[in-house]
Image (cartoon, rainbow, N blue to C red):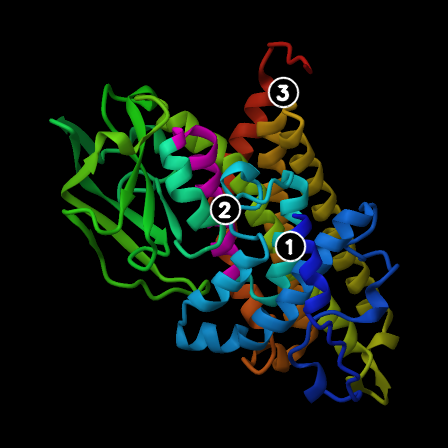
Amino acid sequence: MASALKKVTKLSLIFHKRSKDLTAIRRSIGDIWVNGSCIDPSIGLSEEQIQIQQLATDFAKNELFPNMAQWDQQEIFPKDVLKKAGQLGFGAAYCREDCGGTGLSRLDSSLIFEALSQGCTSTTAFISIHNMCAWMIDEFANDDLRQRWIPQLAGMEKLASYCLTEPDNGSDAGNIKTSAKLQGDNYVLNGTKVFISGGGDTDVYVVMCRTGEAGPKGITCMLVDKESPGLAFGQKEKKLGWNSQPTRSVIFEDCQVPVSNVVGNLGDGFKIAMRGLNGGRINVGSCSLGAAQNSLQLTRDYLKVRKQFGKTLDNFQYLQFKLAEMATKLVVSRNIIRTAAISLDNNWPNKVPLCSMAKFFATEECSKVCNDALQLHGGYGYLKDYAIEQYLRDTRVHQILEGTNEVMRMLISRDILTDEERKYV
């Protein structure tokens, strides 16, 4: 990360001295007043972590936020900007350094995704999924696959997609139907994956497929190259949000995959998927934090300039209380996300329920913050001239993917109701 941190000096930090009118605060990111306030995202961080956070914030301001609306409205997948993110070490943030990963902790990586998502939540969410895929390869694949893929994924010269969900199996991931039959030196895959972020535009697919018995123990993880014979894609989906990343079905019709592309051991796929999703839940929660952070900052600025009944809105006590509630939801969400990240870094025995808590709480409460921000903007908040409505649309799906929030509640209650002792090691 040291080389990436040096680049912070090359990225110009632009603080606009904006006039106090509505036009100036329609679309902006960050304000000096946040520093040292109760919603300052750098509170409690080390000097190095603040540098990492600032690097990502600068990138969000300069590369993401100015393009956020255009990417959304024109459904542009910004591969050129993703490569720039890769050059800063954001493509394989928590992968090992020996194959080109950045080698950061889960907590440090969370800081990056939170900061980037202020600039474009949709694009950052894709970066977070790409990172989850890279980690699965780095953690479970053999050295040949690691050396082949991690350097390219780290620089985001190649992009990865995660393929778990099927038309008839979403939350019930242990019963996926996509099959892989061994024929000579290849597996032959048949089946369909749905709601695949980046589908059709990415280069490698981390696929969970059935090689054995029914249930979780019969699932294996494989890497499928985009050029594999028998791989096809459905039409691009039209979505409420996340429009800067394409979503398609990924279709396997006698798709040929070399035996050497198996990740881990046969039957390890479900375990790999679940371990990957623990981190993915922190990642998507972090993306919700960034959207809520900037929604709150924009709302604060709006209340100080918008006048009704002869005075600015920040003078109305009800709106002051609402702002306080929004700030509290944001900070509590941030704290639980960072606690969950620490639990993964330290392999706490309660890491699964903590990641589940963090994901469902942060995605729900941060979505409420974005919704309240829109309400406090009144009719202006409903316009696409303002960033608030996009933050709201882009964060809504966070309550569904990486395990629905209903499943998160199941995992939490299961941990509470078990009679087994969990020990710290």
Residue reaching furthest to the top: 420
Tell me which residue sits at (59%, 50%) in the image. 363
Check disc 3 and give the amino acid type. Answer: Pro
Give the residue at mark 2: 131
Mark 1 and mark 3 lie on one chain; the one further toward the N terminus is 1
Q: Which residues lie in the magenta part?
A: 123-143
Q: CA distance from mark 3 to mark 2?
A: 24 Å
Residue 146 drawn at (x, y percent): 41, 36
Give the residue at mark 3: 349
Residue 232 in view of the camera: yes
Q: Which mark is residue 4?
A: 1
Check disc 1 and give the amino acid type. Answer: Ala
> Is 208 located above or below residue 241 in the figure?
above
Q: CA distance from mark 1 to mark 2?
A: 17 Å
Tell me which residue sits at (52%, 76%) in the image. 69
Residue 214 occupies quadrant: top left
Mark 1 and mark 2 lie on one chain; the one further toward the N terminus is 1
